[in-house]
Amino acid sequence: MAEAKAATYESIMKELRDGKYRPIYFLMGDEAYYIDKIAEYIAENALKPEERDFNQTVMYGADVTAAQIADAARRYPMMAERQVVIVKEAQNIKQTDALEKYVKQPMMSTVLVICHKNGKIDGRKKEYVKALAQHGVVFESVKLRDRELPAFIEDYMRGKNVAIDRKSTMLMADFVGADLSRLTGELDKLVLSLPENDRKVTPEAVEEQIGVSKEFNVYELRDAIVNKDVFKANQIINYFDKNPKSGGLYSVLPILYNYFQTLMIAYYAPNRNSQEALAEWLEFGKPWQAKAFMTGMRNYSGIKVLQIISKIREIDAKSKGLDNPNTPSEELMRELIFYILH
């Protein structure tokens, strides 16, 4: 069998939907979402329901040895075209010698799915990796960067035949973050809440179902800072003082740091005057995502951005007690926002 090319989630799922199953799937990486989706699809579709009792085995790395996995994979299917062996939490397998031997000569009638989460295969095991790639699929599931989340959200909702506006997309991306399992769960909650005659997510729906306010939250504060809207920024900070659960220093710091760090990268773009070119430079999925950074470059010089990043780091250290015996977080946030806006 020819050596497989680098696999992507899309290429693997296309093959599976076309009914093509490989003898081995080695699924590894820090993003559990894609690993789980591939394994779940194989578990639900590689065998007919009546074939699963005798031909589908699920094992856990902490409970079995590599030899037991290899023995299970060498069995012949019973009254079926193939058998499926799924190994979850494979990163907990202590010794892999027997498994390394098996993958060099795998059973063509077995679909062995190895789910190795929170890391990658030992780079020193070159022969193991070579055999895996030769006879099956090696896939690394990488966590999405914050800048890639809006495109993921829009594509996910499109797959559900649901529209979502830009503000709602950014609220979801910023509030939930890059845990795709949690993010898709929250998106599914939104989908279920929509009436049949209006399949569009709005900021009001996000506020009602997810619990993040569309008006006074850390994302609106970030937008006010991007636009240098001093009045609105102070209005939001005053609201936070009265409603601490709506936002505070510890939720504001990472959002501002990510924004200004990306803004610094934007200054190095070959073409900063084109929204499409800037989006491509910043590796955004959608051109509109670059708009806030074009605005930021108009309102903040490169030198000021460097100073802001340094100030954010200083405030972060103070919030953890370094060189700050007693200044409360509320005052630290006011100090930071004043510094950024003036």
Image (cartoon, helix red, strand yellow):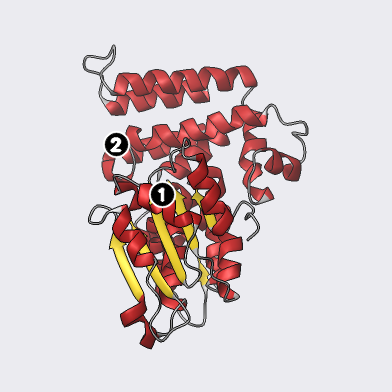
Residue at left offset 54%, top offset 30%: 260
Frontmost of labels 2 and 1 is 1
> At label 1, which amino acid type do we have?
Phe
Tell me where residue 338 appears, x and y as whole percent: 45, 23
Residue at left offset 48%, top offset 73%: 109
Q: Which residue is mark 2?
A: 241
Q: Tell me the element at label 1.
A: helix
Quadrant in the picture for residue 158 = bottom right
> At label 2, which amino acid type do we have?
Asp
**Counting residues from the N terminus, which is met first, the one under dot 2 or under dot 1?**
1
Other residues around mark 2 within 10 Å, as few (<14) / some (14–19) / many (≥20): few
In this rendering, the count of numbered labels is: 2
Tell me where residue 314 appears, x and y as whole percent: 39, 17
Q: Nearer the viewer, residue 77 or 202?
A: 77
- Distance from Cα at disc 2 to Cα at disc 1: 19 Å
Name the disc covering residue 212, or none.
none
* Position above or below: 196 against 146: below
Q: Which residue is mark 1?
A: 175
Give the position of the N terminus as an image quadrant.
bottom right
Other residues around mark 1 within 10 Å, as few (<14) / some (14–19) / many (≥20): some
Q: Nearer the viewer, residue 46 or 309?
A: 46
Asked if one can make out residue 208 in the rendered structure from this viewpoint, the answer is: no
Residue at left offset 30%, top offset 29%: 330
| In-image side of 19 versus 249 (left or right) | right
Residue at left offset 65%, top offset 38%: 282
Quadrant in the picture for residue 75 = bottom left
* Position above or below: 192 against 119: below
| In-image side of 278 versus 162 (left or right) | right
